[in-house]
Image: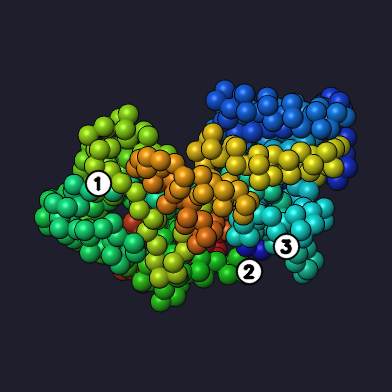
Amino acid sequence: MLVSTTLTLGLISSCGANNSNKSSGELEFWTMQLAPKFNQYFADLNNSFQTENQDIKIRWIDIPWSAMESKILTAISANTAPDLVNLNPNFASQLASRNAWLDLDEVITPETKAVYLPNIWQASSIEICQENQCEQDIFGIPWYLTTRVTIYNQKLLQEAGITKSPETYAELKQVAKEVKSKTGKYAFFITFVPGDSGEVLESMVQMGVKLIDESGKAAFDTPEGIAAFRYWVELYQEKLLPPEVLTQGHRYGVELYQAGETALLASGAEFLSAISNNAPTIAQVSAAAPQITGKTGKKNVAVMNLAIPRNTEKPDEALQYALYITNTANQLEFAQQANVLPSTKEAVKQYIANLEQEANTTPLQQARKVSALQLKDAEVLIPAMDNLQMLQKTIYENLQAAMLGEKTVEQAVKDAASEWNNQ
């Protein structure tokens, strides 16, 4: 999406300003929700880095997930930001549009960029426009990744006469009919609650819908957009989705799957561990398949990255440390400890090779392999942009109106586009 640097964050200081509230002797690094589980990992990582770079001392601070947005906004505004911070592209892009981050295109060589998966590298980019001139800014270095897999109840699918998990939304609709007809249960749950999961929005992109154009206007009032709206409306009106999809979030879908009430669950591979603890009987009949997609074949990936505030006093040291954290060896070690995916090409290759060498293939190991192998088709389906939550709210609310018969599908699409364009 095009964003303008005239949308400034009122209190952000200019490039190179002093960060007077921090000790000049330390490089401050913030992460999200990684302590205390990874205390030893960062102790070892930082000791190793400081041994190789004795003039740089690291101060690691972990921030709870729920507090990070407010804390980094406050710190940027007050000019007390850390030298390096762990965020995700969607939130980091809101500050990128306000000139808060160092433009990494200016300091990272093409050879270094080529180390990372190209689709993942591109996820931390945004087009900045000023005085009718637009430039692509890279505001983050990829760190760790997760991709959804389809966790499925083999027993329930067998009862419905289904031999394999659906791979596309077209197949999913047919599976939903068979599961409901043969078992009386629902095939899956997906939420249309505006403030919850963006999975429906991502499904539209997978179906070939372009959400916004280069000028930031709605681009989904098209035959593809109408078809995507109609897909979800028909599933609901044919009673192939639980009625709670309009009122309950993703967590409710998890509960349904663990209770054996749905056959499919879109989640991270690691959720198989939680199912084993919470619903061991369901875990015994669960397996993993690739993420369901549309005609594009695209699969979604969630990215965590590292961003360097533009006003840091230590841009060179912060970049050196960020590249150290995200090099192949350190990414591979973190991915194995955290059960996530790495973002360098070589680390992904080694991660898959390590899984293939493991003697006993458990459902969890299988799910991890599925998750890693689909990285080749994975990208951040919803680009970094301002007002993403408003776009989701506008589309979901109009979808709900069509599902409830309050609007035709065509009118819901037209109204959603008009509301977005006139916000």
Residue 345: image location, x then y, percent: 62, 54
**Amino acid type, residue under disc 2 in the picture:** Ser
Which is closer to the viewer, label 1 or label 2?
A: 1
N-terminal label among 3 and 2: 3
Label 1 packing within 10 angstroms: few (<14), some (14-19), many (20+): many
Q: In which quarter of the image is residue 257?
A: top left
Q: What element carries label 2?
A: loop
What whole-number distance in Å separates the C-alpha atoms at marks 3 and 2?
A: 14 Å
Q: Quadrant of residue 364?
A: top left
What whole-number distance in Å separates the C-alpha atoms at marks 1 and 2?
A: 44 Å
Residue 165: image location, x then y, percent: 28, 56
Residue 334: image location, x then y, percent: 59, 37
Circle on res. 153: 1
The answer to whether residue 261 of the structure is visible from this angle is yes
Q: What element carries label 1?
A: strand
**Amino acid type, residue under disc 1 in the picture:** Asn
Residue annotated with mark 2: 215
